[in-house]
């Protein structure tokens, strides 16, 4: 008896004679097998300008820790993304730290002396040239030129989703199961988003690993000096209330497995100051020497492979499963991202 | 400017003069404020027989690590719960370890020599008296005597939920937003569950911190020797495919912040054997001397306070928020559990 509750079919195969391996060959591939079989054309290169390389201090055993963040492309959150590149290029993020780790919620990093009444040091002055965004920019109006700038494809997707809802209302289509937070959710050029049919404003969704911008009370929208990533169940109540700017695509475990802070909201107390993980440098990948630039690609969310992958997640029929769920949360359909050949 | 993106109103108040504090007094309490104001009668004591106290080896700094698990009450998963108490009382769980930590998925513990081709030692023999469950027991038929054993209340809740769906279909009620995995989800005596209106079988849901039973391929259903807890976004595709038996109610950070395994499925490889966290003992709380028994209580999910708490989570209007979500995933409505006075 094997006890790994999600043992891969491949692992089982190793222990079976060849005839049994044939018999055990799955009728339905698992989601990761569908991704592995994607044709090369389904993978889209991520521009180096959209990659942030964040180098943490080595761990207790001296092992290096690097986190790679993919910044969100247009039409989402571009004012904050501008600021984040600016902070990185001003080397403002160098020598900041992880100051907050709240279980099942977020890991947050920034200047430990910034707005911390117990801190001994002075906060770093912010660099010049930062944009100030309004709350309206938490969402994207699919009918505007900003969205049209991506060939109107986002508007097309919005219209297709509202039509699907319409067919359901007429009784000619099945009720789409689209979650608790919006009339529908979908993917656009590699990113999850959600929206309501009576409003053209759509928004990116707070899924595991997404990166957002800390802010003060409204109408403040945050500059990008303070960032966080989601390390638990998706806090979708933050959608439309805070800017999302990207996602962690490598090294997530260096942020998710940090010790939790025991102060309010998971901040490290002054007694725990030693637990703050130092962030040594943050660089835009395109600023690194070509040989040091990491290269990544994502599975096109407009590809047939992605549709098959999402369907397989919603209806697991690979050998371990006995009852397919019949649906999947947008945050469980993680967009596949992988290292690309240099 | 404060950068804590979910700074508590109370923390802000400290920095404001008294008049401003009055003005800043929230019109709507936050979910945790609603829970704090619950009358004592809304809290339900958890029987000591339903609490497992799991003592891990101290951390690298010698700090003790204790995890408390609340076992699921009838009518859910009682065969496995029986086995788990039996394993604990046979001291079978003593000196096992955490063998798997997969990011955004699960932390899993059991006998490291069990079904591990690379292990040096022999697996522990299982104790006698274990029950063998069928896959049918992953769900509970609300019309059966097992469910009626809790006063038919689960059936009543099921009927109320299907009526709500009916009113929506007649156009006399709003479409309930109940997620991607089932026609509806709700709470029953402190536990989240989900169901479909055309089928009386309901099931508990795989939310963050829930504890389940590792198993082999179907028709195996697992004994309880191998347990896991969810440390990421709810893997709801496991619902009805695997037994849920409880949830972590204290010390979750000791399981969620462990180093991730680099082997397949997040298992620690033999080279990483040193990362396996030893589990020293696991005891049913009622077997401990009375003075050592931890006491916990949960907020009745049938109380008005819980209804107000859930509503506030679905529609955050406390000072930080600008757009209430209008819905909440069942896994974001975490049942409040707290230490009770001894």
Image: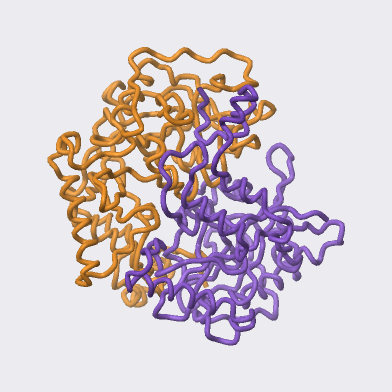
Chain colours: A orange, B purple
Query: Is residue A181 toward the left or the right of residue B189 in the image?
Result: left
- Image quadrant in which you'd find residue B83: bottom right
- Number of labelled discs? 0
Q: Is residue B335 above or below residue A205?
A: below
Coordinates of residue A10 in the picture (x, y in percent)? 38, 64
Residue lying at 19% horizontally and 38% vertically, measured from the top left: A147
Q: Is residue B106 above or below residue A10?
A: above
Q: In this view, does A148 lie above or below B338?
A: above
Coordinates of residue B82 in the picture (x, y in percent)? 67, 75
- Please state which of residues B54 and B17 is positioned toward the viewer in this rendering: B17
Coordinates of residue B165 in the picture (x, y in percent)? 39, 72
**Does the image show residue A19?**
yes
- Please state which of residues B301 and B256 is positioned toward the viewer in this rendering: B301
Residue lying at 75% horizontally and 63% vertically, measured from the top left: B283
Q: Is residue A284 above or below residue A13?
A: above
- Image quadrant in which you'd find residue A92: top left
The quadrant the C terminus of chain B occupies is: bottom right
- Spot the residue most to the left: A151
Query: Is residue A260 toward the left or the right of residue B128 in the image?
Result: left
**Does the image show residue B269?**
no
- Spot the residue most to the bottom: B145
Residue lying at 24% horizontally and 45% vertically, measured from the top left: A200
Coordinates of residue B244 in the picture (x, y in percent)? 55, 68
- Please state which of residues B134 and A41 is positioned toward the viewer in this rendering: B134
- Please state which of residues A167 and B206 is positioned toward the viewer in this rendering: A167
Query: Is residue B235 toward the left or the right of residue B299 in the image?
Result: left
């Amino acid at each position: 008896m094997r006890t790994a509750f999600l043992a891969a079919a491949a692992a089982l195969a190793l222990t079976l004679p060849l005839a049994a391996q044939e018999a055990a060959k799955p009728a339905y591939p698992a989601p990761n097998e569908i991704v592995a079989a994607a044709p090369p054309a389904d993978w889209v290169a991520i521009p180096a300008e959209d990659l942030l390389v964040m180098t943490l201090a080595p761990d207790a055993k001296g092992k290096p820790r690097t986190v790679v963040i993919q910044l969100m492309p247009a039409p989402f959150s571009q004012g904050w993304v501008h600021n984040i590149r600016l902070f990185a290029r001003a080397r403002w993020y160098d020598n900041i730290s992880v100051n907050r780790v709240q279980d099942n919620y977020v890991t947050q990093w920034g200047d430990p002396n910034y707005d911390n009444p117990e801190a001994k040091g002075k906060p770093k002055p912010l660099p010049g040239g930062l944009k100030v965004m309004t709350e309206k920019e938490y969402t994207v109006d699919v009918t505007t030129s900003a969205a049209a700038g991506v060939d109107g494809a986002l508007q097309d997707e919005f219209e297709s989703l509202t039509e699907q809802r319409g067919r359901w209302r007429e009784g000619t289509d099945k009720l789409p199961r689209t979650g608790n937070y919006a009339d529908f959710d979908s993917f656009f050029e590699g990113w999850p988003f959600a929206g309501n049919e009576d409003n053209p404003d759509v928004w990116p969704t707070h899924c595991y690993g997404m990166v957002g911008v800390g802010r003060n009370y409204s109408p403040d929208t945050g500059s990008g000096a303070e960032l966080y990533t989601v390390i638990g169940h998706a806090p979708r109540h933050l959608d439309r209330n805070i800017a999302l700017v990207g996602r962690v695509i490598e090294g997530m475990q260096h942020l998710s497995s940090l010790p939790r802070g025991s102060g309010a909201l998971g901040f490290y107390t002054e007694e725990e100051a030693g637990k703050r993980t130092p962030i040594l440098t943050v660089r835009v990948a395109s600023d690194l020497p070509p040989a040091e630039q990491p290269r990544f690609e994502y599975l096109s969310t407009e590809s047939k492979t992605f549709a098959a992958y999402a369907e397989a997640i919603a209806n697991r029929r690979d050998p371990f499963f006995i009852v397919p769920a019949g649906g999947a949360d947008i945050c469980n359909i993680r967009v596949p991202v992988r290292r690309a050949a240099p």
